[in-house]
Amino acid sequence: MSLYFPTPAEHSVREIFPGVTLHACALEKMMLSYVELQPNAEVKEHSHPHEQVGMLLEGRALFFIGDEQKMLQKGDRYRIPGHVKHRVIAQAEGAKALDIFCPIREDYL
């Protein structure tokens, strides 16, 4: 086990919603998560105190953040301030994304 180069087997893996799997890697103050959304999977509306920024790596997904919505595709980015309600619906091809949280989401480790 390396302090600086964690393997995928050392990441925390959680199914946070049906069809939505999150792989988390964290330090003391920030966390990176790789998220896989199966076709038509939904991240239900929720909010949290953590700031979140991310980028869609593959596929397409409809994002609802606050009072805005937008269809995102590969390369599109998003930012979600703390306490803002949001949800995501993957489209027929599914989606993959990277999220960064600050502070870390203890519930994902």
Image (cartoon, rainbow, N blue to C red):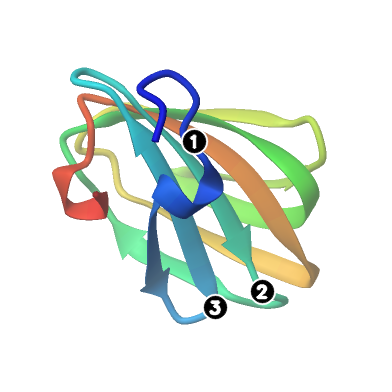
Q: Nearer the viewer, residue 44 or 65?
A: 44
- Of pointers 2 and 3, the one earlier in the residue sequence: 3
Q: Relative to 67, does residue 44 appear above or below in the rendering?
A: below
Residue found 73% across the figure and 31% down from its top: 76
Q: Are marks 3 and 1 in contact (CB under 8 Å)?
A: no
Instruction: Name which of mark 3 and mark 1 comes first in the sequence.
Output: 3
- The mark found on residue 19 in the picture is 3
- Residue linked to disc 2: 38
Q: Return the residue nearer the eye: 28 or 104.
A: 28
Report crowding for label 3: few under 14, some 14 to 19, many 20 or more residues within 10 A (C-alpha): some
Classify 10 Å Cα crowding around label 1: few (below 14), some (14-19), many (20 and above).
some
The location of residue 107, given as percent across then percent down, is: 17, 53
- Residue type for callout 3: Gly
Name the residue type under label 1: Asp
Residue at the spot of label 1: 99
Measured in 3D between alpha carbons, the distance from the residue under mark 2 to the one under mark 1, in whole angstroms, is: 17 Å
Secondary structure type for disc 2: loop
Report how far apart the C-alphas of labels 3 and 1 lie in the structure: 17 Å
| Residue 40 tag number | none
Disc 2 crowd rating (10 Å Cα; few below 14, some 14-19, many 20+) is some
Counting from the top left corner in percent of width and height, residue 17 is at 40, 74
Relative placement, left or right, of 34 versus 56 is left
Q: In the rendering, at what x and y percent does residue 58 appear?
A: 80, 48
